[in-house]
Image (spheres, grey):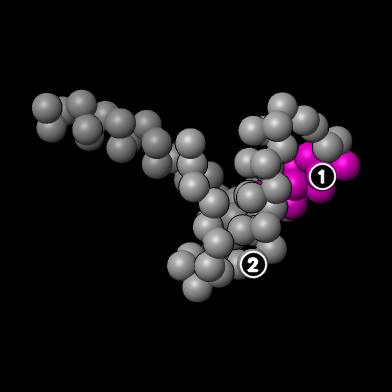
């Protein structure tokens, strides 16, 4: 089981992101859902994804990284 981070100084994550992560973990562990929470988090994720895309364009890093890992074996 994943341990919760209890001391905010132990992580570089912003407090609101950490709180959302902990809430998502608690909900998942309890087998519960909170549709409003899910909508808010998904909306924030989309906003961040769109912002990164506007700033940097398509970041195609996964496929090249996997290919490099395969060739290093």
In the displayed structure image, the side of residue 21 where residue 60 appears, left or right: left
In the rendered image, which residue does mark 2 sit on? 15
Q: Which residue occupies 46% across, 67% down?
A: 10
Give the x, y percent position of residue 51: 66, 57
Instruction: Give whichever of 25, 66 is nearer the camera.
Output: 25
Query: Disc 1 or 2, which lies upstream in sequence?
Result: 2
Residue bearing the label numbered 1: 37
Q: Residue 3: x, y in percent?
A: 49, 47
In the figure, is residue 29 to the left or right of 39? left
**Residue 26 is drawn in which quadrant?**
top right
| Picture coordinates of residue 71, whole percent (x, y) | 15, 28
Q: Is residue 16 magenta?
A: no
Q: Residue at x 55, y 62 (%)?
A: 6
Badge 2 marks a residue whose secondary structure is helix
Asked if the residues shown at circle 1 and circle 2 are in contact, with their CB atoms under 8 angstroms apart, the answer is: no
Q: Which residues are magenta?
A: 36-46
* Residue 66 sits in quarter: top left
């Amino acid at each position: 089981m994943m341990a919760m981070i209890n001391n905010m100084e132990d992580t570089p994550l912003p407090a609101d992101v950490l709180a959302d992560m902990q809430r998502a973990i608690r909900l998942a562990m309890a087998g519960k859902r909170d549709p409003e929470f899910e909508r808010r988090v998904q909306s924030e994720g989309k906003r961040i994804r769109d912002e990164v895309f506007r700033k940097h364009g398509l970041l195609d890093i996964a496929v090249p990284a996997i290919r490099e890992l395969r060739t290093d074996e």
